[in-house]
């Protein structure tokens, strides 16, 4: 599908579809689908089906188990069993209780042929995704949101829209489409069909990140040693067997420690990949190159231009399930494209900030300590949402009046987690792991590595690492002005002191400069078109002010405009499929 004006209506990319299997619960005409398994009211489309030995349990899903060797030993099975066969065997023995034994990344459907019930499962931290839409007498479930498009209306969920504009991703079980849900990380949803409707029988957690502070009498060195032992174990499990491995290396602590551990344990080539945005833009190449040289990796550097960012955005939005308004989506994809030339497994440092008290927590912690009477429950939520520095404070003017009225009194799904009695840093960590991790970071990793035929793995988001992080005393995660103190202690011996001691800076994409000097005309044509997909929901007069840079005292318009451009293009791509 092509449009006359490139900037008013984008060109729908000719994409390679991500895995598009799905299952249907309820009675349908099987001849209408590419069915690989069916019974009276359960149908599997385009997917490999694994059965347990007596055929009672049917397993369908995207599964990678990092602890498969341990599971094979427990079950006294040989190495020929696949991960799906392992889960079929475990489910037969333990039922849902087997989920606590699984480490790795998985989203799966388990059909019980005897009880006529379907179980939907998503791993504890949300490395894989699973979506479902209830069509009345049927429910359709898929690992990719786009696979469900033929089965639901294209009506936007207004609360999900508000959340995206506030956080740059859709939060919790909602998706941007009304009546389409995402299974939350660490959850099991049990359902069955009747002649009248789909019945939800049980919706419960098998694992969630929770504060369990332990060993408070021990010092930082002791906790660092415990963390290092676990990091050694996890990183070795995440490395490919007898193959080269790739690592996204920014030069920050998180990606650097994964690089150092991989280089220590992997006896095959280790390739590292870094980006920059041209010689006139600040970059971290000094630090990433230092780590690459120190760890003796084969280092690759990619320059990304303004045209790369703009012209590739439709392709990237076509690969994302819900839209993500982080400008790093395009660099993540482009870096994956060159990484695939050398390896099919790519590691990253995602998870260090959410799990170990990254610097973005400091302003909220200071406000909590010194805010006094302003620390009401309402302000706790507002402070957290404002920390994303997106459009939350603009919503009364940005949303059309009827849209703002519809959403303004609906609480954010993460609000309850801010009101607990946990240590405040641990409250922030829980929210960042459960929502930002599962709904933005890990979804982005999964979508944009699969789209490049890569296997993306995030060792610092391993469930065991997350669990240990919630047990470490808070003062060893954010110690005054020193962020991630315990992680630094854990890898002190394998990284240059320049990396251990440097402050967190983050990779800044120069969207502020590019919108003002390169993309302004294009963005105006895209966002201010009366037929734009966002036009029924957003105030285009305010967007026009942003595009003209009127009153941009805090230099934030570029980030906000990228958020809106990403949303508009995502909607056009989805509706043009």
Image (cartoon, rainbow, N blue to C red):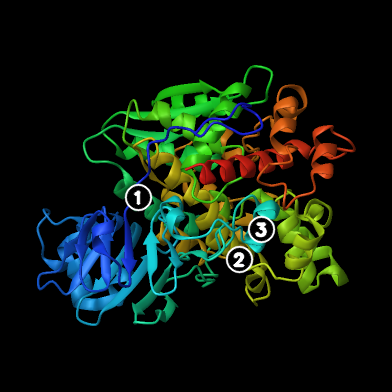
Which residue is pictured at 87% across the width and 72% down the height? 373
Q: Which mark is residue 20?
A: 1
Of all residues, the one furthest to the right in this rendering is 551
From what the image shows, is residue 421 above or below residue 286? Answer: below
Between tags 1 and 3, which lies in front? 1
How far across and down, in percent of the image, does residue 453 sit? 34, 37
Position of residue 366 measured from the top left corner of the image (x, y, whole percent): 77, 59
The image shows residue 440 at horizontal and vertical percentages of 54, 51
Marks 1 and 2, the one that precedes in the sequence: 1
Q: Position of residue 37 (x, y in %)?
A: 20, 62
Q: Label 1 crowding class (10 Å Cα cut-off): few <14, some 14-19, many 20+?
A: some
Q: Viewer-nearest of labels 3 and 2?
A: 3
In this rendering, the count of numbered labels is 3
Q: In which quarter of the image is residue 35?
A: bottom left
Question: Which residue occupies the extreme top position in the image?
Answer: 279
Residue identifier under label 3: 163
């Amino acid at each position: 599908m092509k449009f006359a004006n490139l900037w008013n209506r984008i060109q729908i990319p000719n994409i390679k579809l991500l895995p598009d299997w799905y299952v249907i619960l309820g009675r349908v005409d099987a001849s209408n689908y590419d069915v690989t398994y069916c019974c009276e009211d359960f149908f599997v489309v385009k997917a490999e089906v694994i059965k347990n030995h007596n055929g009672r349990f049917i397993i369908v899903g995207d599964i990678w188990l990092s602890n498969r060797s341990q599971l094979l030993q427990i079950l006294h099975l040989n190495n020929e069993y696949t991960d799906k066969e392992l889960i079929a065997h475990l489910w037969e023995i333990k039922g849902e209780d087997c989920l606590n034994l699984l480490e790795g990344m998985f989203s799966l459907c388990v059909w019980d042929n005897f009880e006529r019930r379907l179980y939907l499962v998503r791993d504890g931290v949300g490395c894989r995704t699973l979506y479902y839409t209830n069509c009345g007498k049927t429910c359709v479930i898929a690992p990719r949101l786009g696979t469900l498009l033929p089965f639901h209306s294209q009506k936007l969920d207004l609360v999900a829209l508000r959340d995206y504009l506030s956080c740059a991703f859709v939060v919790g079980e909602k998706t941007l489409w009304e009546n389409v849900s995402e299974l939350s990380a660490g959850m099991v949803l049990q359902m069955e069909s009747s002649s009248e409707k789909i019945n939800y029988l049980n919706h419960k957690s098998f694992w969630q990140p929770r504060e369990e502070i332990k060993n408070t009498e021990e010092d930082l060195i002791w906790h660092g040693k415990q963390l290092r032992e676990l990091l050694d174990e996890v990183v070795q499990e995440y490395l490919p067997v007898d193959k080269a491995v790739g690592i996204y290396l920014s030069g920050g602590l998180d990606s650097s420690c994964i690089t150092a551990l991989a280089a220590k344990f992997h006896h095959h080539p280790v390739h590292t990949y870094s980006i920059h945005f041209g010689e006139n833009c600040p970059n971290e190449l000094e630090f990433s190159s230092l780590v690459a040289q120190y760890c003796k990796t084969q280092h690759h550097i990619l320059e990304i231009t303004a045209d790369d960012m703009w012209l590739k955005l439709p392709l990237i939005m076509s690969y994302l399930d819900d839209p993500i308004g982080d400008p790093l989506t395009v660099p993540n994809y482009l870096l994956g494209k060159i990484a695939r030339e050398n390896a099919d497994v790519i590691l990253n440092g995602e998870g260090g900030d959410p799990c170990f008290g990254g610097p973005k927590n400091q302003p909220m912690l200071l406000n909590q300590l010194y805010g006094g009477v302003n620390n009401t429950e309402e302000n706790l939520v507002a402070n957290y949402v404002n920390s994303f520095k997106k459009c939350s404070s603009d919503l009364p003017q940005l949303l059309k009046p009827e849209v703002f009225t519809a959403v303004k009194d609906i609480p954010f799904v993460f609000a309850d987690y801010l009101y607990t009695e946990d240590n405040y840093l641990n409250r922030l960590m829980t929210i960042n792991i459960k929502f930002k991790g599962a709904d933005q970071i890990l979804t982005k990793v999964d979508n944009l590595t699969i789209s490049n035929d890569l296997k993306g793995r995030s060792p610092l988001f391993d469930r065991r690492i997350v669990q240990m992080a919630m047990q470490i005393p808070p003062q060893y995660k954010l110690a005054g002005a020193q962020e991630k103190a315990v992680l630094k202690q854990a890898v002190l011996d394998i990284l240059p002191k320049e990396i251990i001691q440097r402050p967190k800076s983050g990779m800044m994409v120069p969207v502020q400069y590019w919108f003002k000097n390169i993309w302004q005309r294009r963005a105006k044509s895209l966002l201010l078109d009366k037929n734009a997909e966002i036009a029924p929901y957003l105030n285009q007069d305010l967007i026009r002010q942003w595009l003209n840079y009127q009153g941009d005292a805090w230099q934030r318009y570029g980030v906000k405009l990228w958020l809106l451009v990403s949303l508009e293009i995502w909607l056009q791509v989805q509706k043009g499929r």
